[in-house]
Image (cartoon, grey):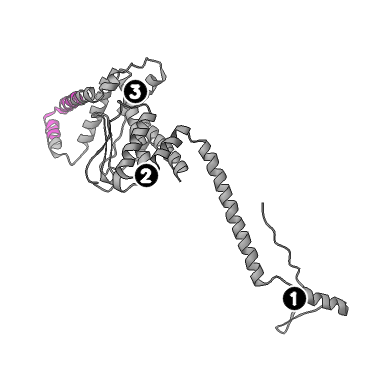
Amino acid sequence: MGIQVGNNTQIPVYTNNNVKFKQNFNLSPADQQSEDKFEKSGISNKKKGIIAAGIATAAVIIGVLVNKHIKAQQLKKVPEEFKTIFKELKNETGDNFVNKAYDKLKKYMKLEGVAPEKIGRAGADQGINAVQGGFDPSLNTIKYTDGFFTKLDRATQFEMLAHELKHAEQTSKIIRSGKLDEYAQAWAEFNVNNTKNNPLNIPFGMAYTQAKANGTEKEFLEKVTQNTKNQILDNMKKSHQTSLAMPQFKPGSQEYQDAERYLDATRNYEGLGFMAIPGENYRNNPLETEAYGFGAQMKKFFNIVMS
């Protein structure tokens, strides 16, 4: 709805030799007097300012009401459970917020005893990114460098916690579908391939170069991969005891189908790369797409309720 302020009717203005004058035709003395009064009773600059201020105030009020309406509609889409969670987190900051938010998310996702018990610290930030860290499926840990605790706002912290817990959930589904051995194999192949392409791992590079020179490249990679798998498998059996003890998902169930997708995505996983920057292939991997989407949704809920 718009607001229209009056119409101004202009008396014809004629210009001659750079002199402007008003020409009125067929006006009686009474008419002329009436016109003079009309001209003198125009809206003053002060009144114009008051009207403009009123319009501006009305616009602000309308904007506030519209925003309140939008937020009310958004709040309806936030599950009541999250409203309760955010209410309990409202006054928490620092490590207290991180630890409490993590516990709340873990309980919401039904990952108690499955996901890592707590968030760990991975030391000082390194490289060009402000924060590093994440979920380690082999050791079943979630760690972040110091910047996560000191440089990020609470909404982003909540988002990242949700992201990594989604990875913990993915891993648990794979294990509970009886695919632990295949999972360890997939991560072993990933790790060996990353190591092979890392120019900073000089000892591995020298051994690999020597194997190629001897014509034993295939045997060398198979042996390294098997040793890596054995180590990962041993770690997983120790760190995922809860998932291993839980009822297994039956073939054909939704959880089992999810696990098959996750395992296939693990086989085609691409790491962050040499500079630890997430590329397009990394983000488009189904494991990451799901985790990024879940984290973004949690951050959206957080901002709606806490703003």
Overall secondary structure of the magenta stretch? helix
Judging from the image, what secondary structure is the residue with disc 3 in? helix
- The reply to whether residue 144 is in sight is yes
Disc 1 target residue:
40
Question: Does residue 221 show up magenta in the picture?
Answer: yes
- For marks 3 and 2, the one nearer the N-term is 2
What span is in magenta?
Answer: 207-230
Rounded to the nearest angstrom, the CA distance separating label 3 from label 2 is 29 Å
Disc 3 target residue:
173
Q: Are marks 2 and 1 in contact (CB under 8 Å)?
A: no
Rounded to the nearest angstrom, the CA distance separating label 2 from label 1 is 61 Å
Which three-letter amino acid code belongs to the residue tagged 3? Lys
- For marks 3 and 1, the one nearer the N-term is 1
Rendering quarter of residue 38: bottom right
**99 or 8, nearer to the observer:** 99
Which three-letter amino acid code belongs to the residue tagged 1? Lys
Residue neighbourhood size for the residue with mark 3, other residues' Cα within 10 Å, grouped as few (<14), some (14–19), many (≥20): many
Rounded to the nearest angstrom, the CA distance separating label 3 from label 1 is 83 Å
- For marks 2 and 1, the one nearer the N-term is 1
